[in-house]
Amino acid sequence: MKRASLLTVLIISALGAPAASWAVEYTLPASGSRLVGQNQTYTVQEGDNSLQTIARRFDTAAMLILEANNTIAPVPAPGTQVTIPLQLLLPDAPREGIVVNLAELRLYYYPPQGNTVQVYPLGIGQQGLETPEMATKIGQKIPNPTWTPPAGIRQRSLAKGITLPPVVPAGPNNPLGRFALRLAYGNGEYLIHGTNAQASVGLRVSSGCMRMFADDIKALFSQVRVGTPVRVINQPVKYAIEPDGRRYMEVHRPLTQSEGQNPQTMSYTLPANYAQFVADKGTDKVLVDKAMYRRAGYPVPVTSGAPVQANSVQSAQNSSVSGTPAQVTQ
């Protein structure tokens, strides 16, 4: 398949029963801090017949679970212990409105009132149809959207023997779901929207728009206003010096641009101040190299001279995961 890896196909095809999803909400850290949350462990159950099923329990992306558990099978066996990466470094961007970090398949929403950030998984553009980086705003809120397939999507569908209708009416079969947020970028062709293909959330399969679970887009839609700032960034490598001096790195696999690229070995385009962070005497270069090699997708300590400790992990109660909002206050 030209635009989807075999792993993506396995995740999509191994769907389980639908599960409720919700935002993971974090209390914002103190001034100067970016570290929030706590990783969790989860024991795979008989009904968890895909990583996507597990991801939806925690409202995260299947690809993030793959990063955190780099030897896990796309369909893990019951009894398998899985790390759920719910600890993270907030992106290096203003804490206002919506911030999308393409590299981690996450949308951050900072409510204008309060001291929290809501984090949602996203489906983004596939290879060749990438979601662009941008600084824009919400230009329009569209409840019950209809969908007019663009010419490019029509052509790709025809090549597969599928003839799309001129307009898909609003309803459960609409590819935009029940809610859409049009971005004031370009000609307004990019949306943050729901989807009738829930399995695609958390993967790179769209034509450039950003897809959310039905419950997630409903929650986000109800809160944001027209004019809300939106920043779409690509930060596969995040790092921070915490107020107490501890240093962390969160390294994600970069977004591939072609089928031949290996995200585990691709090089990164790094910000200018990264070299200073690594060269500083407070940073352990060996731990930095390990973090860059492993690409685990969650924060790891890289403080020079500090004892190496396992990441703080909280065990999730399997019986209470589904149906209870994940609110992280750390």
Image (cartoon, grey):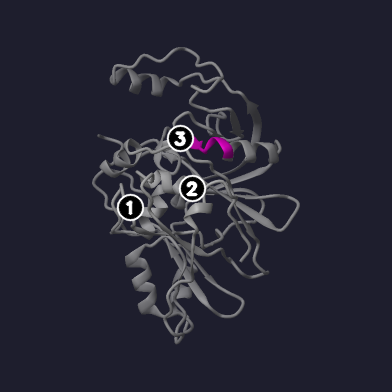
* Three-letter code for the amino acid on which mark 3 is drawn: Gln
Residue 198 image position (x, y, % from top left): 46, 35
Quarter of the picture containing the C terminus is bottom right
Front residue of 215/78: it is 78
**Label 1 crowd (10 A; few <14 / some 14-19 / many >=20):** few
The crowding category of the residue bearing disc 2, from other C-alpha atoms within 10 Å (few below 14, some 14 to 19, many at least 20), is: many
Q: In which quarter of the image is residue 222?
A: top right
Q: Position of residue 321 (x, y in %)?
A: 52, 52
| Residue type for callout 1 | Pro
Q: Is mark 1 on a helix, strand or loop?
A: loop
Rounded to the nearest angstrom, the CA distance separating label 2 from label 1 is 16 Å
- Reply above or below: 10 against 106: above
In this orientation, which residue lies closer to the viewer: 314 or 278? Answer: 314
Tag 3–tag 2 contact (CB < 8 Å): no
Task: Please tell me whether residue 91 belongs to the stretch shown in magenta.
Answer: no
- Secondary element at tag 2: helix
Residue 143 at x, y percent in the picture? 64, 26
Where is mark 3, residue-wise? 198
The residue beneath circle 1 is: 78
